[in-house]
Amino acid sequence: MIKKTLLYFVLLIGAVSFLYPFIWMISASLAPDKEIGSLVLLPSHITFDNYHQLIQKIPVWRALFNSLFVSGLVTLGVLIFGSMTGYALARLEFRGRNLLFYIIIFTMTIPFQITLIPQYIIMVKLHWTDTYLALVVPGLMNAFGIILFRQYFKSVPQDLIDAARLDGCGEFGIIFRVMWPNSVPALVTVGILTFMASWNDVLWPLIVIRDQSLMTMPQLVTLFVVGGRAESQLGVKLASAVLLALPIIIAYMFFQKYFINSASSSGLKG
Amino acid sequence: MAAVKLLNVRKTYDGKEFAVKDISLEIKDKEFVVLVGPSGCGKTTLLRMVAGLEEITEGEIIIGDRVINDVPPKSRNIAMVFQNYALYPHMTIYNNMAFGLKLRKLSRKEIENRVNEAADILGLKDLLNRKPKALSGGQKQRVAVGRAIVRNPEVFLFDEPLSNLDAKLRMQMRAEILKLHQKLKITTIYVTHDQTEAMTMGDMIVVINNGKINQYDTPMEIYKNPVNKFVAGFIGSPPMSFILGKLDLSNGNIFISLDKAVKLSISHLHLTDDFDGKQVWLGVRPEDFRLKQPSEKTLNEEIEVTLDLVEPMGNESFFHFQLAQSNCIARVQTSDRLKTGDKIKMYLMKDHLHLFDYTSERKL
Ligand SMILES: Nc1ncnc2c1ncn2[C@@H]1O[C@H](COP(=O)(O)OP(=O)(O)O)[C@@H](O)[C@H]1O
Ligand SMILES: [Mg+2]
C-alpha cells in the first residue's frame, strides 16, 4: 500500500514537471500581455490578442499548410517505400540482399551534419531549392522505417504470403493487401515517428527554403522568434509556439489510442 | 481437371544437398494421391514445386499438357490448403474465400454464387461475416478448403491439413475431404506424415524417404507387398516387427533360424542357393502372429514368448514381447486371461512373412 502511494507520488511529480511548462505556455499565450511575467496558470481573462497579432505578422496558415503537406507526403513516402524495401529485404531472395541491408544500417550511423552539405549541393544542382521538392524528396525514404518494416515482416508466417501468391497476388498485392493490413502497429509507429521528425525539422528547411510562402511552420516560427520580428513580445512568441506544437499533440492523441488498439488485436498467428 | 506428371524432379536449397532427389511420378486425372513419409523427407518441398512456390532445380513438372516450370503460381490453376490454415487475419471468412476470385476479376454475382455454394457444402453459412480469429481449428481448416474449392482449380494440393486438429476432428475432416473429392472429382495431391491418413484416403500412395520415392502403389498393395524394410515399417499400425535371422538352404528346403531356439521352415519361398547362410530381416505384421489355442493343431512351429506389455484396445489387444532379441507387436483378440508377464505360445502365418536383405533392406 505504501509502495503504491509512493509510486503514484513519483509519477505525479514527473507528470507535473513535464506538463507544467507546457500548460503554462498555453495559458500564457491566452493571457493579457502584462500578466505573462507571473507563473500563475489561470489568467484573469482569456484573450486571443496574441494570436491576432501573430497572424498579421507572419503567414501562419500558409506555413501550417506547408508543414502538413510536406510532412504528410514524407510520411506517406516512408510508409510506401519503406515497407516495399523492408519486404524485399525480409521476404525475397536475391543476390546481395544482406550487403544491401548492412549498407542501409550503416547509413543510420552517419550523422546528419555530414550529409547536409552534399545534399544541399544536390538540391542546388537539381534546381530544387525554394521548391517543395527539396523539402519532400530527400525525406521519402529512411533507414529506420526500412529496418522496422523488415523486422516486422519477418514475423509474418510464410504460408500467408504463399496463400496470397496462389490467390493471384503479385508482390505489390502481397505488400499492400496482405502485409499492410496485418502490420498496423508497424505502420503507426513508423508513421508517427516520421511525421514528428519531419514536422519538427528546422535545419533542413532553413537551408533550402528562402521564399516565405514555402516555409514550414517550425522554420517560420524560429525565424520569427529569434529573427527579431516578434519585437520581444513574449505573448506572440508563445502563441506561435502553441500553434507549432498543437498539430503534433492532436496527431499523437489520435494515434496513441489507435496504436494501443492495434497492438493488442493484430493476431497474426492462428 | 488434369493429370500431373513429374519427370526426374530434383531440388536443392543450398546447391549441395538435395531435398528432393530425382522424383518421377504420374498422377492420373481425378485421382487422390497421398504423399507420405517421415518429417523432413521432402514432401512439402515437392508440393511447393508443384504449386510454383519453390523453384524446380532440375526436371519437369507437367499439369495437363503444359510444362509449368516457368509458369507463375497464379497461372497454374491449382489451389493449396496449408497446415496452419493461412487465412487472412484481417478479412472476414467471406472475403477470405472471395479474395482470389476478386483478383481474378470475376463479377460480383459470380463471386457471391461460388462463395455461397462452397459455404453450403462445408457448412460455413453462419460464419461468413466472422474473422478467422473467432473460429475453431476445424472451422478454420474448413474455410481454407473452401478458399481452395471456390477457385475451381485443376489440381488440389494439401500439405498436412489435419495435423493441427485433435484426433476426433481429424477423423471427421478426413471423411469430409474424401466426400468432397468424390463430389468434385478434382485431381488431388495430399501430403501427410501419418500413415493412417495415407492408408484411408489415398487411391494411390507414394511413400517417400530421404527425397526419393520408395514405392508408388495402391494402399493395399503397399501394405501387402512393401518393397523394402522402410516402407514395411512405415506403413501399418502398429508397425511390422523385424527380427534378424539367418537363412539355411539345404537340398530344396529353406529354413530361417531366429535364434538357437526358433527355426522356421519357409520352403514355400523361392530363393536362389547363394542366399545360404545369409543374414536377413524377417518382417511380421501384427496380425500374422497368432495366439495358439491349447486344443489347436497346426503345422506351424510354435514359439514361446513372455508378454512385456498388454495394450487392450477394446475388441482386440496389442501384445508386446521379445523374440530373438527384437521387439515385436502382435494384434490378437482380447482375452481377459492374459496379462503382462504371462508366458504364451504363438505361431507365425508363414504365407504372409516378409524377408528383407540385411544390407540393402530390399524385399527378397
Ligand atoms: N526453405 C528451405 N531452405 C533450406 N532447406 C530447406 C527449406 N525447406 C526445407 N528444407 C530442407 O529440405 C528437406 C525437406 O524438407 P520438407 O520438404 O519440408 O520435408 P517434409 O515436408 O517432408 O517434412 C529438409 O531437410 C529441410 O531441412
Ligand atoms: Mg512438411
Image (cartoon, coloured by chain):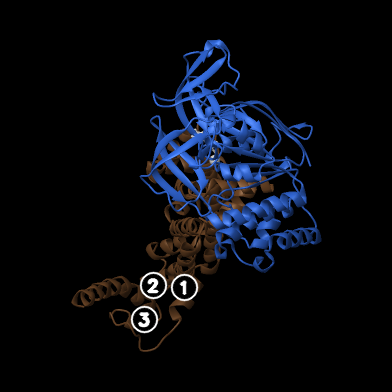
Along the line of sight, the residue nearer the viewer: B159 or B288: B288
Instruction: Work out how far the residue at label 3 is from the one at label 2, CA to CA, in angstroms.
Output: 11 Å
Residue holding disc 3: A33
User: What residue is disc 2 on?
Assistant: A238
Q: Nearer the viewer, residue B180 or B339?
A: B339
- Labels 3 and 1 within one chain: yes
Secondary structure at numbered mark 1: helix
Residue in view at x 64 percent, y 62 percent? B93
Position of residue A45 relative to residue A256, above or below, is below
Q: Which chain is blue?
A: B
Please, what is the three-letter code of the amino acid marked with disc 3? Asp
Q: Name the chain under label 2.
A: A
**Crowd tier of the residue under label 1, counting other residues whose Cα lies within 10 Å: few below 14, some 14–19, many 20 or above:** many
* SS under mark 3: helix
Q: Nearer the viewer, mark 2 or mark 1?
A: 2
Instruction: Give the residue number, with chain letter if any, for mark 1.
Output: A54
Q: Amino acid at mark 2?
A: Leu
